[in-house]
């Protein structure tokens, strides 16, 4: 058995963040008395993804994104709102998002018998803990490493150095990272000298020069690789 330690991303790997984000955004707009539209949501998603990409590149801090993304969004429609207050409302909904990706419990229960599992995720700690615990998957993991707690975001080497330092007897050669993000999980693993498995969602294409060691299209495929 080549690997004995598995590092799992959370969003769109174990928990369906896309579904959670969509429902939470719709609830936010409703709560604030605005009119929801798919156009509004698509504008938000594009803007938000760009801001998180800048976080990964170290160009902007998480706090700035959280405090300004909704005010920047609504300013595009000629409205001035309290971005921080909107973020608080949005986060209340986001914290309750417990949607699982397909086959999660089946796969984790089998892997838990043979491997030591850890979570490695970017995000706000209270949100990630709430979702992981609420979805009933925390039982499978020995520990949970979240960027807000660490003070660095994937793919930064500082994130993975922290993980290495806090896993007793950590061995890069016996560790595999599983995640959906080429620029976060796979790039981070490459920088840290850890093998990677890209969870490629349907319709996703890797147009970068970043290469994973493995590629899967469902979590069940991971069982065959291991």
Image (spheres, rainbow, N blue to C red):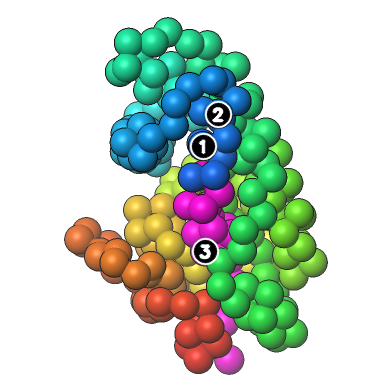
The image quadrant where one finds the N terminus is: bottom right
Q: Residues within 10 Å of mark 2 (few under 14, many from 20)?
A: few
> In the rendered image, is residue 70 in sight?
yes
Where disc 1 sits, the SS reads helix
Marks 2 & 1, CB-CB < 8 Å contact: yes
Magenta span includes 208:
no
User: Relative to 79, is 60 above or below?
Assistant: below
Q: Earlier in the sequence, mark 1 or mark 3?
A: 3
Task: Name the residue carrying label 1.
Answer: 26
Mark 2 vs mark 3, CA separation in Å: 28 Å
- The percent position of residue 27, horizontal first and vertical second, equals 57, 35
- Res 210 → quadrant: bottom left
Residue at position x 66%, y 64% in the image: 118
- Res 193 → quadrant: bottom left
Q: Nearer the viewer, mark 2 or mark 3?
A: 2
- The percent position of residue 145, horizontal first and vertical second, equals 65, 51
Mark 2 vs mark 1, CA separation in Å: 6 Å
Task: Name the residue carrying label 3.
Answer: 13
Residue at position x 43%, y 62% in the image: 180
In the picture, measured across the screen, residue 149 lies left or right of residue 221, that is right
Where disc 3 sits, the SS reads loop
Q: Residues within 10 Å of mark 3 (few under 14, many from 20)?
A: many
**Rendered image: mark on residue 209:** none
- The percent position of residue 127, horizontal first and vertical second, equals 66, 41
Task: Name the residue carrying label 2.
Answer: 30
In the picture, measured across the screen, residue 129 lies left or right of residue 39, that is right
User: Relative to 62, is 177 above or below?
Assistant: below
Please give the range of residues in magenta. 1-21
Residue at position x 22%, y 59% in the image: 208
Query: Farthest residue in the top direction?
Result: 80
């Amino acid at each position: 058995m080549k690997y004995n330690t598995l590092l799992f991303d959370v969003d769109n790997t174990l928990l369906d963040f896309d579904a959670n984000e969509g429902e939470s955004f719709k609830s936010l707009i409703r709560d604030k008395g605005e009119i929801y539209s798919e156009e509004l949501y698509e504008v938000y998603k594009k803007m938000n993804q760009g801001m998180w990409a800048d976080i990964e590149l170290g160009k902007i801090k998480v706090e700035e994104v959280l405090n300004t993304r909704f005010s920047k969004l609504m300013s595009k429609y000629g409205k001035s709102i309290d971005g921080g207050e909107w973020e608080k409302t949005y986060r209340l909904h986001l914290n309750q998002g417990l949607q699982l990706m397909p086959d999660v419990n089946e796969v984790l229960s089998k892997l838990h018998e043979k491997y030591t599992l850890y979570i490695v995720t970017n995000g706000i700690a209270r949100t990630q803990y709430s979702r992981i615990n609420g979805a009933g998957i925390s039982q499978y993991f020995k520990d949970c490493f979240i960027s807000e707690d660490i003070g660095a975001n994937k793919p930064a080497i500082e994130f993975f150095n922290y993980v290495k330092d806090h896993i007793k007897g950590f061995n890069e050669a016996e560790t595999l990272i599983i995640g959906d993000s080429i620029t976060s999980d796979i790039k981070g693993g490459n920088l840290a000298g850890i093998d990677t498995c890209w969870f490629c969602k349907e319709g996703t294409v890797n147009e970068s020069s970043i290469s994973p060691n493995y590629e899967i299209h469902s979590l069940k495929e991971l069982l065959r690789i291991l």
